[in-house]
Amino acid sequence: MYAVEVRDHVMIAHSLPGELFGPAQGLHGATYVVDVAFHREELSADGVVVDIGRALDALKGALGPLNYKNLDDLPEFAGVVTTTEVLCKHIFDSIAAAARAGELGPGSEGLAKIRVTLNESHVARAWYEGQV
């Protein structure tokens, strides 16, 4: 399996209601380093997994509406606890939609799966991985 990975970051604020989350129950900020890996069994006719520039554009497009926002105020997260895992899936859905729409360039229809990893710190990360 071949893979290409791109990286960006996003700064958000949110609260995580529920005893499980301890001090994170209150409003706090987080800066995530976001990695998106694109996987395919065979390279495209151009010898690539995916166009890296377009992959970066899709990632920026997915993160833009979240950057410098309080997720508690966004309608798409109403009633949702915005854990790192939930954010991984949200970003995955945006990137996968871009791939299905052909926004990642020629050959992107051959992608097998995408993995979105949110790095919370140097000691903790979460990811969501799914078929395109």
Image (spheres, grey):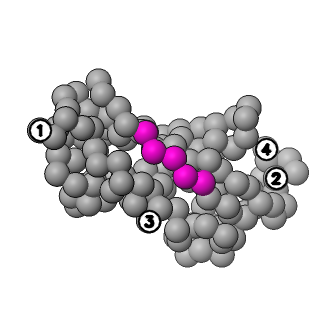
Query: Label 3, label 1: how many angstroms apart (C-alpha)?
Result: 26 Å
* The residue stretch that appears in magenta: 5-9
Q: Residue furthest right?
A: 23
Looking at the image, tell me whether mark 1 or mark 4 is earlier in sequence order: 4
Amino acid type at circle 4 is Leu
Q: Nearer the viewer, mark 3 or mark 1?
A: 1
Q: Residues within 10 Å of mark 2 (few under 14, many from 20)?
A: some
Seen from the viewer's position, the closer of residues 6 and 97 is: 6
Label annotation for residue 61: 3
Label 2, secondary structure: give it: helix
Q: Residues within 10 Å of mark 4 (few under 14, many from 20)?
A: few
Position of 22 compared to 132: left or right? right
Is 53 inside the magenta-drawn segment?
no
Label 1, secondary structure: give it: loop
Q: Position of residue 94 (x, y in %)?
A: 40, 59
User: Main structural element of the magenta stretch: helix, strand or loop?
Assistant: strand
Amino acid type at circle 3 is Gly
Label annotation for residue 36: none
Residue at the disc numbered 1? 45
Q: Residue at x 29, y 49 (%)?
A: 51
Q: Nearer the viewer, mark 4 or mark 3?
A: 3
Q: Residues within 10 Å of mark 3 (few under 14, many from 20)?
A: some
Query: Label 1, label 4: how many angstroms apart (C-alpha)?
Result: 49 Å
Q: Residue at x 58, y 67 (%)?
A: 66
Query: Label 4, label 2: how many angstroms apart (C-alpha)?
Result: 9 Å
Looking at the image, tell me whether mark 3 or mark 1 is earlier in sequence order: 1
Amino acid type at circle 2 is Ala
Label 4, secondary structure: give it: helix
Residue at the disc numbered 4? 20
Looking at the image, tell me whether mark 2 or mark 1 is earlier in sequence order: 2
